[in-house]
Every structure is written in C-alpha cells, then in structure tokens.
Image (cartoon, grey):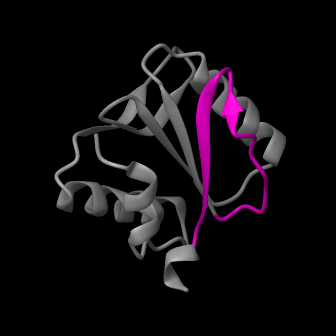
C-alpha cells in the first residue's frame, strides 16, 4: 500500500476551493497509480471524498466548524471499509491521533507549497 499521507504532502495541491483541492488530489493519486474510489458512499448519509486502496479515507475541507468536521470523521470511522482517516484541510483545527481506534492524519493545505 502506498503511503497516502506522504504522497499528499509531497504534491502542490491547490486549495482555493474544495473542488480545486479534490481535483489536485485526484491528479496526484492518478499520476502515482494509486487505486481509489471518488465520492465513495459509506452510509446513507456519509460520502467520503476519496477512499484509497487499503481503506484510507481522504476528506477535503476548506471551511467548517471543527466539531462538525470531527463528527463527520467519527461517522466515517464507524465504517468497516475505513481503516485510516486523512483530513486535508485549510481550516485551522486539531485532530486526535485516532478516532474509534482508527489512525487519523491531519494535512494542512499549503504545507507542501513551503
């Protein structure tokens, strides 16, 4: 399995809008030959932006209340299809190292541009 966190941190992904961010991640994953599903339905009310090989859920957020984002990620962690959660965000927030026993990673948009 590819190290999705390292891959996402290595690319210069635009982040002016969530769509730009998603398109940048799509190009990066495709170029690296990584298998993924886009807009993967996890439940009746939850659809993650990307579900990458190995059960890595990648969610993009430009804005949003941190607690609202956390509740969304917590629901993702309840899915048996999700093994790891990666939040790629322009929102200033923290994230625990695990949610429901599943490892989480926070990537702040713009980090790779430095």
**In the image shown, does 89 or 18 lie closer to the viewer?**
89
Which image quarter is the C terminus in? Answer: bottom right
Question: Which picture quadrant has residue 25?
Answer: bottom left
* Picture residue at 81% right of the left edge, 48% below the top: 65
x, y percentage for residue 113? Answer: 51, 83
x, y percentage for residue 51? Answer: 38, 35
Q: Is residue 4 above or below residue 79?
A: below
Q: Is residue 14 above or below residue 53?
A: below
Magenta includes 29?
A: no
Residue 87 placement, left or right of 66: left
**How many numbered discs, if any?**
0
* Picture residue at 65% right of the left edge, 33% below the top: 73
x, y percentage for residue 97? Answer: 69, 40
Residue 101 placement, left or right of 48: right
**In the image shown, does 76 or 23 lie closer to the viewer?**
76
Residue 66 placement, left or right of 108: right
Q: As drawn, which residue projects farthest toward the bottom?
A: 114
x, y percentage for residue 95? Answer: 74, 45
**In the image shown, does 114 or 23 lie closer to the viewer?**
114
Question: Which picture quadrant has residue 81?
Answer: top left
* Picture residue at 74% right of the left edge, 51% below the top: 64
Q: What are the residue bounds of the magenta stretch? A: 90-110
Which image quarter is the N terminus in? Answer: top left
Magenta includes 93?
A: yes
Residue 40 placement, left or right of 74: left
Q: Is residue 28 above or below residue 47?
A: below
């Amino acid at each position: 399995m590819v190290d999705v966190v390292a891959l996402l941190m290595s690319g210069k992904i635009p982040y002016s809008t969530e769509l730009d961010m998603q398109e940048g991640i799509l190009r990066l994953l495709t170029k690296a030959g990584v298998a993924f599903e886009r807009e993967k339905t996890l439940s009746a009310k939850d659809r993650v932006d990307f579900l990458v090989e190995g059960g890595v859920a990648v969610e993009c957020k430009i804005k949003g209340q941190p607690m609202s984002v956390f509740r969304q990620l917590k629901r993702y962690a309840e899915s048996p299809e999700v093994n790891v959660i990666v939040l790629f965000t322009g929102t200033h927030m923290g994230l625990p190292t695990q949610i429901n026993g599943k490892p989480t990673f926070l990537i702040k948009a713009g980090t790779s541009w430095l």
